[in-house]
Image (tube, grey):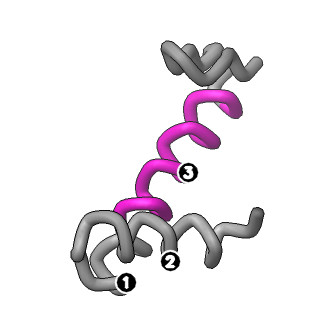
């Protein structure tokens, strides 16, 4: 599944415009990336841990 697929699925399931969903997904990914780059782990309950 690609980022575009994720955006499409969220948009279809919520009725939120793709542009808005894409901004939110991008912000989420940047936050996770910045946290990992800063040496912190990311824990997402029900999904997994990234380190």
Q: Main secondary structure of the magenta part?
A: helix
Screen quadrant of the N terminus: bottom right
17 lies above or below 42: below
Q: Which residue is mark 3?
A: 29
Within the image, what quadrant is residue 50 found in?
top right
**Is residue 25 found left or right of 18 in the rendered image?**
right
Looking at the image, tell me whether mark 2 or mark 1 is earlier in sequence order.
2
Task: Kindly report the distance in space between the C-alpha atoms of the residues bearing marks 1 and 3.
Answer: 16 Å
Quick one: 39 or 10, which is closer to the camera? 10
Q: Which residue is mark 2?
A: 8
Identify the residue at image location x=38%, y=75%.
Answer: 12
Find residue 46 and report its horizontal and vertical position in percent.
53, 17
Identify the residue at image location x=63%, y=73%.
Answer: 5
Q: Which residue is mark 1?
A: 18
Q: Is residue 20 magenta?
A: no
Disc 2 or disc 1, which is closer to the eye?
Answer: 2
Quick one: 42 or 34, which is closer to the camera? 42
Looking at the image, tell me whether mark 1 or mark 3 is earlier in sequence order.
1
Q: Where are the magenta residues, as a range?
A: 24-37
Judge the density around disc 1: few (<14), some (14-19), many (≥20) Cα neighbours within 10 Å: some
- Determine whether label 2 and label 1 are within 8 Å by CB: yes
Within the image, what quadrant is residue 36 found in?
top right
37 lies above or below 22: above
Quick one: 42 or 5, which is closer to the camera? 5
């Amino acid at each position: 599944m690609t980022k575009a697929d994720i955006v499409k699925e969220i948009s279809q399931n919520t009725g939120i415009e793709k542009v808005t969903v894409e901004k939110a997904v991008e912000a989420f990914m940047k936050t996770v990336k910045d946290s990992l780059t800063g040496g912190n782990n990311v824990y997402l309950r029900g999904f997994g841990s990234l380190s």
